[in-house]
Image (cartoon, rainbow, N blue to C red):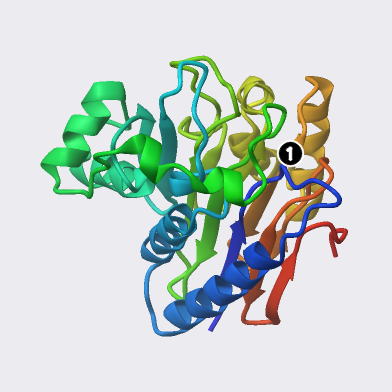
Amino acid sequence: MTYALVLHGGAGARPGTDYTKQKAHLDGLITAGQAKLIDGQSALDVVTWAIEELESSGLYVAGKGSAPHSLGGFELDASLMHGPNRRAGAVAAIEGIQSPIRAAQVVLNDGRHVMLAGAGAQHAAKSAGLAQINDPEAYYTEHVSHGSADSANHGTVGAVALDIRGELAAGTSTGGTFGKLVGRVGDTPIIGAGTWADDTVAVSCTGLGEAFIRTATAYDVSARMRYAGTPLKQATLQVLDEVAKFDGDGGLIAIDAQGNISMPYNSDGMKRAAVSDTMPPVVRVFEPEI
């Protein structure tokens, strides 16, 4: 019974910062997610569940942990992709919705579009009955308590999974970069840049979004594997080298169809956790890749 799950809480980890709470939270999630996969839940459902948990915790720069943009408001992005049929859903610059990843799921399930933005995304989420935020300034306060109120910092959350039926899925959610211009959209909601899943690999990225967009990072992992036969680990390292050429720092998490895992980063650290049928749960921030 092959399965695998990888989570990330952003590649904006800074040396000297205590991430004890984040590590404990990731440990609990990766263990619970493992149980869900063993129980037969789908990769798509587990990815969506995990990201919603990351959003609601307030421990990362996504969901409740998001910080305001340059005009003081809160615009969030998220995307979700199902590998077997490449169904995808994304929301960009969405306001007033507690769980952007659930809003992305609404778009995916509806099937007419891949991405909705701004007021349109908010309307679709409200129409689907998703929980709303009535007082944004009171709700989005956790970024201060987890030490991320830094205009130079960035962060994202994401998950990739392989279920026991051999299906891959990926998702990503973010509050964006601190002090970003109103209306700015990074790589997170862009299928192929911040998120990708097909029958070869599932990828979720985190880092400086503009560089990830310019290199189509998430899709490029799959392309290198499918067209050149590049192994997962090598492919993920190669795409991060491309990101670095555009002054981009960050990382990604990926699982291939055989259950192999890769979690590389070129920033100071990346909050991440992984488990598979051949590997017990691991949680890391600054430790090097295995």
Residue 203 in view in this figure: no
Q: In the rendered structure, which amino acid carries the disc numbered 1?
A: Gly
* Vertical arrangement, residue 104 with respect to residue 112, above or below: below
Residue at (62, 74) in percent of width and height:
27
Residue at (54, 57) in percent of width and height:
160
Residue 252 in view in this figure: yes
Left or right: residue 107 versus residue 139 is: left
Left or right: residue 80 versus residue 213 is: left
Residue that sits furthest to the front in the current view: 138
Residue at (53, 56) in percent of width and height:
159
Mark count: 1
Q: Quadrant of residue 149?
A: top right
Q: Nearer the viewer, residue 96 or 113?
A: 96
Q: Residues within 10 Å of mark 1 (few under 14, many from 20)?
A: many
The C terminus - image quarter: bottom right
Residue hosting label 1:
250
Q: Position of residue 128 (x, y in %)?
A: 14, 45
Left or right: residue 46 versus residue 179 is: left
Q: Nearer the viewer, residue 83 or 69?
A: 69
Q: Position of residue 56 (x, y in %)?
A: 42, 56
Q: Position of residue 170 (x, y in %)?
A: 49, 52
Q: Quick one: SS at disc 1?
A: strand
Left or right: residue 70 versus residue 99 is: right
Q: Position of residue 231 (x, y in %)?
A: 76, 53
Residue at (18, 35) in percent of width and height:
124
Q: Nearer the viewer, residue 147 or 284?
A: 147
